[in-house]
Image (cartoon, grey):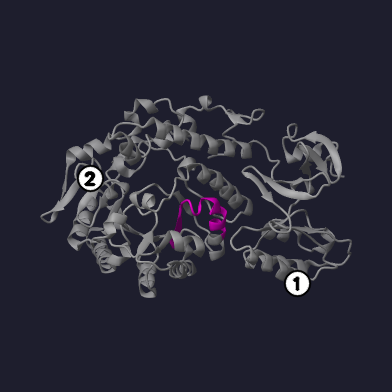
Amino acid sequence: MPRNRFKGIYDEKSDSLNIAQIKPDFFLKEEKHPRKKELDKPGAVVLFVSSACNGGCLYCYAAESHKNGKLMDFPIAKATIDEAAKKSKKINIVFFGEGEPTLAFPLIKKIVEYLRYKQRNTGLEFGTYLLTNGLFDKRKARWIFENIDKISVSCDGPADIHNITRGRSGGGHSHALLEKNIKYFLSGNPEKIRLKSVINPLSVKRQTEILEYFYRLGYRGEVLFAPFFESKQSKKNKLKPIDKDFLDNFLMAEELSDYLDIGISFITRANDFSVKFGACGLSRSNFYVTPEGEISCCSRSISGERKNSPFFYGVFRNSELRINREKEKALRQRTVDHFKECEKCFLKWVCAAGCAFEHFESTGNLMKIDKTLCDKRKQEVAKYLLFRARRESNDLKPFFITDDRGKEKALSLWSGGLAVGEEDNPIIVIDPDKDDFRKLFKKIKNHRDRRGFKPTIFFLRFVSESKHKKHREIIDFLSGLKKEKIHFKLTRPIPEKLINDREKLIEEFGMPETAADSLDFFSVRGKDRIFFGKTDSGMSLKTAKTRKSLADSHNGKIR
C-alpha cells in the first residue's frame, strides 16, 4: 500500500484511526472495483496425491485421514489435467495432500511426464508446485529441484520448536533432515523455495526467533507466517487459540524485519490488502481432487463431512470427472456482491465476505455471515492499520530511550521497545586506536551465538581522536560481521579522518549520512523529553514531527 495513505484517517493527537471514515474503495488502486471477469479464470488445480503421511503435526487438520492413508491413482490425475486443459491453455498443478505428497513420488513423476507430453502435443503451458514437509532423501530432493518449478516447505522454526510441533509419525525428530533439504534447495536456486511456518501456542511468542533462524539459513524470500486453526488434532493435543498473541508478536517481527532490512516479508489475514470479488479461488471453481477422486473447492473442507458438504461438487467415476453443475453454480455465487452485510464495510474488497469454510462451520449456510468472525477480522485489520499509520505519520523513530542519567536502556520502535544493554542488544563503543578488531569480532560472534536465535542487534558507535586512517581495518571488521549474518547498526557517521570511501560505508553497511540520520542524534527520557546529548532541548515528542525539523530547530541545530 502506498505511503501516506493514512493522513485522512489517522488522528495523531489521539493516536487513533477514524474507522468510520474508511470507505470500501479505500483499498482500491486505479480500478473502481475488482474486475469481475477475473472470476472466469480457472481456480487452482490441486492434486491431493496422498492422504498418507510421514509427519506427526500437533495441529494437523487431516490427521484422521492418515490412519488409512491412500495414494491417488494416475487415471484420476490424468482426467483432472485434461478437464483443466479444456478451460485454459495455461494451468498450474499443485501437489498437495491431506498427507505428504512425496510419499506418492512415482505418481508425481508420472504426472510431470504427462504434462510434458501435453505440452509437446497440444501446446499446453504449465507450472508445477509442491507443498511438502521436506522429509525425503537426497535422491528425491535432487529430482524435485530439477523438475518442480516452485517448492513450498513447511518449517516451524529452530529445532527446539519444530521437533515438538512437526515430529515424525510414530515419533522421532524431523528437523535435521528438513534443514538439510532446505539448505540444498537454497544452495541450488533460492528463488525456487518458499518457507512457511505455522504459528501455534508453542511458537507464537517466538516469531522474531523464527525470522532470525530463516535469515541465518540464508533465506531471503517471502516467508508465510500462518496462524494455525483449530482441528480435532489440535484439540486432542490441547493447543489453545493464539489470536491476540499472534498479531502482537507478528507486528514486532514485521517491524524488526524492516528495521534490519533482511528482505523477508510476512503474510497474514490482517495485512493482506489485495482486492477481490471472492475471498479465495472457491468462487472460481477450484479443483481440489482427493486420492479417492472427490472434487472440492476448499482445502479445509477435506477434513470434514463430505457427503452433504456444499464444498464437494464432483467425483471421478467410470474413467471421467463428473461435475455437479448446480453445486458449482452455487459456489460461484459466493462473492462479496451477494452479501448485503458487506456493502458499506471498509473491508468489502479485501475481505470479500471472508473465509467461506469458517463462516459455514459457524452458520451451517454457505451464504450466511457470522458477525462474530466479521468483528474479529475488523479488529485485527484496524490494529494493523493503526500500526502502519503510526509508522507513516512521522519519521522520529527509531531512537534511544534513556534513563535519568542518560544511559540508553531501549530502542523505541512502533511495535514496542527493544531492550538494549549487555545481555540483549549491546551498544559497543569502538575506538580504532585502542580496540583489537579481531578480539572484538570474536566477542560479538560469541555473544550472538550464546543467545541462540534471539535476534541480537549490535549498536556500533565509532569514536576516535586519531589522525590515522583505519579504513581497511574497519571495512574488514564490518564485512566479517555481515558474512557471519550478525545484525549491526552504526549509530553515527564514522569520523571521516578514519576512512577513505564514505559512500561505500553508507551503501554497504548502512552508515548514517548525517547526524540527523543517526540514532545518536537525540534521545528521549522522562515524560517524552527530547535530549541532544546531555542537554534538555525543552521539547517533547508531542511537539516534534520529523527528524529534519529537530535538526533545523534552534536547540537541535547541527553546527
Q: Which residue is mark 2?
A: 312
Q: Which residue is mark 1?
A: 439
Secondary element type, mark 2: strand
Magenta-colored span: 192-212
Q: Position of residue 25 (x, y in %)?
A: 46, 30
Secondary element type, mark 1: helix
Q: Position of residue 232 (x, y in %)?
A: 33, 50
- Amino acid type shown at disc 1: Lys
Where is 553 relative to 158, above or below? above
Mark 1 burial class by Cα count in 10 Å: few <14, some 14-19, many 20+: few
Q: Earlier in the sequence, mark 2 or mark 1?
A: 2
Q: Position of residue 391 (x, y in %)?
A: 62, 40
Rounded to the nearest angstrom, the CA distance separating label 2 from label 1 is: 65 Å
Tell me the quarter of the picture where residue 6 sits: top right
Q: Residue at x 65, y 30 (%)?
A: 12
Mark 2 burial class by Cα count in 10 Å: few <14, some 14-19, many 20+: many
The C terminus: image quadrant: top right
Q: Residue at x 19, y 58 (%)?
A: 76
Depth check: give the residue in front, 69 or 1. 69
Depth check: give the residue in front, 324 or 110. 324
Q: Position of residue 384 (x, y in %)?
A: 54, 39
Where is 361 relative to 468, above or below? above
Q: Residue furthest left?
A: 318
